[in-house]
């Protein structure tokens, strides 16, 4: 059977009526809110499955808690915004040139910012800043849930390296700790990759799951996670974790505390689409399935999962009915379980993407265009929300939270292939409402024409 290939083309010329994005936070270099000496050795030694109290975390919470080395005392450090950050304590390895934020997400008043350990000198990998911080430039990151568990080297339960995080409707934060320090030429595998879930209301880790060795490869990179759950079915949650370097998809069932690996040719790089030209640097990348996006529940009670490779321009989908059933998900021949939706056209290579479920509008980090794109999956139209060759270099993460879209841009190709100027703004978090972001683009639903 011959299938007509649908081609989306992004119109890169912004219209006058285009509202685009608003700059929310910016950094020239990443700094942290340092603990007072001796107060950062907090250990959260065991996973608590019992949710405890209502603790910190809510809107307006401006206190984080450290337990002392002896476990005897609890210290409180005010994290009220606006204070000058002091020097890092002597025994924290901090090299600001190696701190490149990669992921963002929002829960209530917390804007999470992850800094994976791709070099030495990253003091804390999982962090946040208060969304309502009056300071918007160079806001110091606050380690989450505390300093102690983010330190490296540290106890085995410590977080090693986190790329992008998911937040679910049950107030939980999900992420993969890759367990790897990726210093070029000196990759250190500290521990197997772990799925970690934190109850955002209590700041407690409620689940840890090590991904079995036979589901990863030496080139695996588990850089994002999406959660399939409703607020009525919190215990029956599934996580979908694309493996961009191992060309697979890991599916994790929370109820069964078990995962399986899905393989399909559509997860690979597309050989003709691996060329990138960003910030004056030409390079070739081979990243496969990079991020996945879930639709709302359909009539059959399942969602569609959209996916794409970073080195690629096609978009695909598969039903979660297949993914959630281990037998179906891992069968060797998939018939037509996986489907091509269309091609986004040249130069549309996409890092992270997310879907606004109520409108079925997808937002995409168009890395080769220094832009945020959109695709209306109902109308099958595409547009550009904002493009900026200076200020939007490398949209590394895109998240839709309720009716708002957030984008993190981090100038990463300049870090990898050139030299960042740490006196200029390199890292930015942008946001706008979905409605305003698509206004004036082809993703907006056309207004009925005015009857004259
Ligand atoms: C290699 O990395 C480890 C930590 O990941 C570090 O302790 C060690 O000093 C590094 N070795 C070199 C030669 O840089
Ligand atoms: C889930 O599986 C992990 C294995 O990675 C195990 O350590 C943990 O105890 C399990 N958790 C529960 C609640 O069964
Ligand atoms: C999974 O799929 C298999 C094969 O189609 C089917 O026999 C089985 O009942 C399904 N399992 C569940 C839990 O739906």
Image (cartoon, grey):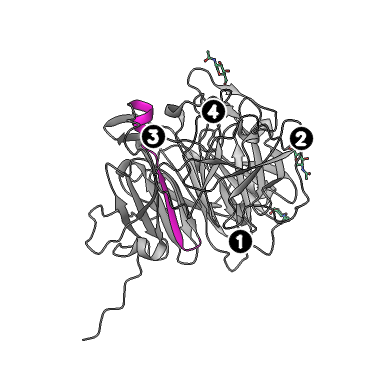
Tell me if the residue at label 3 has its CB under 8 Å from ligand 1.
Answer: no
Q: Which of marks 4 and 1 is nearer the N terminus?
A: 4
Q: How far apart are marks 3 and 4 (CA)?
A: 20 Å
Q: How far apart are marks 2 and 4 (CA)?
A: 39 Å
Q: How far apart are marks 1 and 3 (CA)?
A: 36 Å
In the rendered structure, which segment of residues is drawn in magenta? 402-418
Q: Is residue 146 magenta?
A: no
Q: Does the magenta stretch include residue 414?
A: yes
Q: How far across and down, in percent of the image, does residue 367 sit?
A: 36, 42
SS type, badge 3? helix
Picture layout, residue 374 above or below residue 245: below
SS type, badge 2? loop
Mark 4, Cα crowd under 10 Å, few <14 / some 14-19 / many 20+, is few
Q: Which of marks 2 and 4 is nearer the N terminus?
A: 2
**Label disc, if present, on residue 71 of the rendered structure:** 2
- Residue under label 1: 302
Q: How far across and down, in percent of the image, does residue 126 sit?
A: 56, 39
Q: Distance between the residues labelled 1 and 2?
A: 46 Å
The N terminus lies in which quarter of the figure?
bottom left
**Label disc, if present, on residue 412 of the rendered structure:** 3
- Residue under label 4: 219
SS type, badge 1? loop
Tag 4–tag 1 contact (CB < 8 Å): no
Q: Nearer the viewer, mark 3 or mark 4?
A: 3
Which residue corresponds to the image point at 39% horizontal and 47% vertical from the top-left?
365
Q: In which quarter of the image is residue 34?
A: top right
Q: How far apart are marks 4 and 1 (CA)?
A: 31 Å
Q: Which of marks 3 and 4 is nearer the N terminus?
A: 4
Tag 3–tag 4 contact (CB < 8 Å): no
């Amino acid at each position: 059977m011959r299938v007509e290939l649908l081609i989306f083309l992004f119109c890169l010329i912004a219209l006058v009526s285009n509202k685009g994005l608003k700059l929310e936070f910016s950094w020239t270099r990443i700094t942290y809110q340092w603990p007072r000496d001796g107060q950062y050795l907090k250990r959260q030694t065991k996973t608590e499955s019992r949710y405890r109290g209502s603790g910190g975390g809510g809107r307006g919470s401006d206190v984080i808690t450290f337990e002392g080395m002896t476990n005897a005392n609890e210290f409180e450090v005010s994290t009220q915004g606006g204070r000058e950050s002091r020097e890092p304590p002597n025994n924290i390895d901090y090299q600001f040139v190696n701190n490149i934020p990669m992921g963002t997400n929002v829960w209530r008043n917390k804007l999470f910012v992850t800094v994976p350990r791709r070099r030495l000198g990253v003091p804390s990998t999982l962090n946040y800043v208060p969304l309502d911080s009056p300071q918007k430039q160079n806001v110091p990151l606050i380690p989450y849930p505390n300093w102690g568990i983010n330190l490296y080297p540290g106890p085995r339960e410590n977080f090693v390296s986190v790329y992008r995080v998911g937040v679910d409707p049950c107030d939980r934060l999900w992420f993969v700790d890759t367990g790897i320090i990726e210093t070029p030429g000196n990759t250190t595998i500290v521990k197997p990759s772990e799925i970690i879930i934190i109850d955002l209301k209590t700041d407690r880790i409620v689940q840890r799951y090590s991904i079995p060795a036979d589901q990863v490869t030496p080139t695996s990179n588990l850089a994002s996670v999406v959660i399939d759950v409703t607020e009525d079915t919190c215990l029956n949650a599934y996580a979908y974790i694309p493996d961009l370097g191992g060309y697979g998809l890991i599916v994790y069932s929370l109820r069964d505390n078990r995962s399986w690996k899905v393989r399909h040719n559509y997860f690979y790089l597309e050989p003709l689409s691996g060329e990138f030209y960003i910030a004056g640097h030409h390079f070739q990348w081979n990243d496969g399935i990079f991020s996945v996006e879930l639709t709302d529940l359909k009539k059959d009670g399942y969602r569609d999962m959209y996916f794409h490779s970073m080195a690629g321009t096609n978009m695909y989908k598969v039903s979660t009915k297949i993914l959630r059933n281990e037998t179906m998900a891992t069968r060797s021949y998939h018939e037509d379980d996986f489907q091509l939706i269309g091609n986004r056209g040249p130069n549309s290579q996409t890092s992270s993407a997310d879907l606004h479920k109520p409108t079925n509008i997808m937002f995409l980090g168009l890395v080769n265009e220094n832009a945020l794109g959109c695709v209306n999956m109902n109308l099958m139209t595409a547009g550009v929300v904002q493009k900026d060759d200076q200020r939007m270099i490398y949209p590394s993460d895109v998240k839709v939270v309720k009716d708002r879209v957030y984008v993190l841009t981090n100038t990463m190709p300049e870090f990898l292939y050139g030299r960042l100027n740490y006196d200029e703004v390199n890292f930015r978090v942008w946001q706008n409402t979905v409605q305003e972001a698509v206004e004036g683009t082809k993703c907006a639903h056309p207004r009925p024409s005015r009857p004259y």
